[in-house]
Image (cartoon, helix red, strand yellow):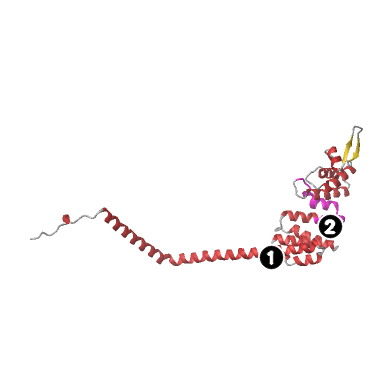
Amino acid sequence: MARTPTSSDRVPATPAEDEILIREIDEAVRQDDALAFFRNHGVKVLGAVIVLIAGLGGYMLWDNQRESELEAQSETLIAALDYANQNDFKTASETVAPLLDAGSPGARTAARLLQAGAALQAGEVDKAAGLYQQVADDAEAPPVMRDLARIRDVTARFDSMAPADIIARIGPLATPDSPWFGSAAELVAMAHLEAGDRAEAGALFAQVAKDEDQPETLRSRARQMAGLLGVDAIVDVEKLLEDEGVVASGGNGGAAVAN
């Protein structure tokens, strides 16, 4: 009679079979966990993905539109400058008019400066001064352009301004660390001269004359004004003579014009 098999008679599973079984159970658990997660949070995840895609698409659309607008504004400014180069300042001013309300800060500033220049060409000093004032007071305008507007405003209205007002308005720009040092210092020095302060005027003129970073025409004017006020503004006499086309003559201390 056959004997009933006992547990001790069963063939034990191999390590490979155990590993396969464990892997299958682990995979089933993962699938159940994933299904449970999507059942509980799927709508939220899908919503977040949609929002992310929509936000990215909206940004790309906005960026593309902004680039197109900036390009259009640049083309408008270039067209206006072309008219200005042809001395058609009226058309140049009309061309940039839309930028005063709808342009970027940089384009708006450039448009105002161009319109101010056109107003000066037409003899409309008050209109030009008002536009320069708008640029100077615009917190969104580039700082260097705001300073330029102050200088242009003073240049346009110099004869009608009190010396103290000129000094107060652009005096801070009449320092060597300012990009507008030469232009501002010349105007401020003239204001000091108008106010009767010859010493301060002469010192400023001499400072401009000695600054090799300034245009030679400006340095030459400043050197002449400093000399008239009794201030020595010449650093290197021999170099100055050479720049002026004059060379020392032999040993008699005279000078001769170079051929």
Structural crowding at the residue carrying mark 1, measured as other residues with C-alpha within 10 Å and reported as few (<14), some (14–19) or many (≥20): few
Among numbered discs 2 and 1, the one appearing first in the sequence: 1
Q: Which x, y percent locates residue 69? A: 66, 65
Tell me the mark number nearer the camera, choosing from 2 and 1. 1
Mark 2 residue element: helix
- For label 2, the residue is 156
Structural crowding at the residue carrying mark 2, measured as other residues with C-alpha within 10 Å and reported as few (<14), some (14–19) or many (≥20): some
The residue at 87%/55% (across/down) is 159
Q: Which x, y percent locates residue 94? A: 77, 67
In the image, residue 145 lies in the stretch drawn in magenta: no
Kind of residue at badge 1? Ala
Q: Where, by quadrant of the figure, is residue 93 drawn?
A: bottom right
Q: CA distance from mark 2 to mark 1?
A: 31 Å
Q: Which x, y percent locates residue 178? A: 75, 48
- For label 1, the residue is 72
Q: Where, by quadrant of the figure, is residue 142 drawn?
A: bottom right
Toward the viewer: 223 or 83? 83
